[in-house]
């Protein structure tokens, strides 16, 4: 069992039955993301401050300055590329839109205290 298998993964309430989505999990040191239909593609871990920046960038369509991952549009898909490892997560329009809508609703506003309780 990997560390990722032990995390409490969640998706946006805007996702279609939690399938084919951006999955997010609070962890002791921050927040981790992966693709629900491709968990073997890897995860991207964010310290809490970088996570808050990433969510703001995704929600507001801002340039990536969080220091952990970039967000790039490729046609109608969104590529989230780690700046630290070789992990790249590609989401289609519906998957990314659900994540952004959840971010706008505050669904992924985690704090260190929430993660420690998980």
Image (spheres, rainbow, N blue to C red):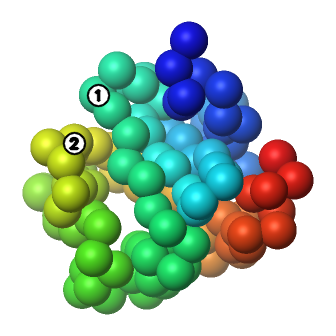
Give the residue displayed 58% in from the left and 48% down from the top: 24
Give the residue displayed 27% in from the left and 65% down from the top: 69
Question: How far from the left and from the top, in percent, is residue 28?
Answer: 66, 54
| Location of mark 2 (residue) | 87
Question: How far from the left and from the top, in percent, is residue 73?
Answer: 18, 64
Quadrant where the image shows the N terminus? top right
Q: Is residue 67 left or right of residue 30?
A: left
Q: How many marks?
A: 2
Asked if residue 13 is positioned above or below residue 109 in the image, the reply reads above
Mark 2–mark 1 Cα distance, whole angstroms, equals 7 Å
Residue at disc 2, secondary structure: loop
Asked if residue 42 is positioned above or below residue 14 in the image, the reply reads above
Seen from the viewer's position, the closer of residues 49 and 36 is: 49
| Location of mark 1 (residue) | 41
Contact? badges 2 and 1 (CB < 8 Å): yes
Q: How crowded is mark 2: few (under 14 residues within 10 Å), some or many (20 or more)?
A: some
Question: How far from the left and from the top, in percent, is residue 64?
Answer: 26, 80
Asked if residue 110 is positioned above or below residue 32 in the image, the reply reads below
Residue at disc 1, secondary structure: helix
Who comes first in sequence, dot 2 or dot 1? 1
Question: How far from the left and from the top, in percent, is residue 60?
Answer: 43, 86
Let me know if residue 55 appears in the view: no
Q: Residues within 10 Å of mark 1 (few under 14, many from 20)?
A: some
Q: In this view, does 45 lie to the left or right of 101?
A: left
Give the residue displayed 44% in from the left and 76% down from the top: 50
């Amino acid at each position: 069992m990997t560390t990722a298998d032990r995390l409490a993964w969640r998706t946006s309430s805007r996702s279609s039955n939690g399938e084919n989505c951006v999955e997010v999990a609070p962890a002791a040191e921050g927040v981790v993301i992966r693709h629900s239909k491709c968990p073997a593609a890897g995860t991207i871990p964010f310290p809490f401050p970088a996570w808050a920046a990433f969510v703001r960038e995704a929600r507001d369509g801002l340039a990536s300055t969080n220091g952990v991952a970039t967000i790039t549009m490729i046609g109608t898909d969104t590529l989230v590329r780690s700046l630290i490892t070789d992990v790249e997560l590609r989401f289609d329009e519906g998957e990314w839109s659900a994540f952004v809508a959840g971010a706008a609703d505050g669904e992924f506003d985690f704090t260190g205290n929430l993660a420690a309780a998980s």
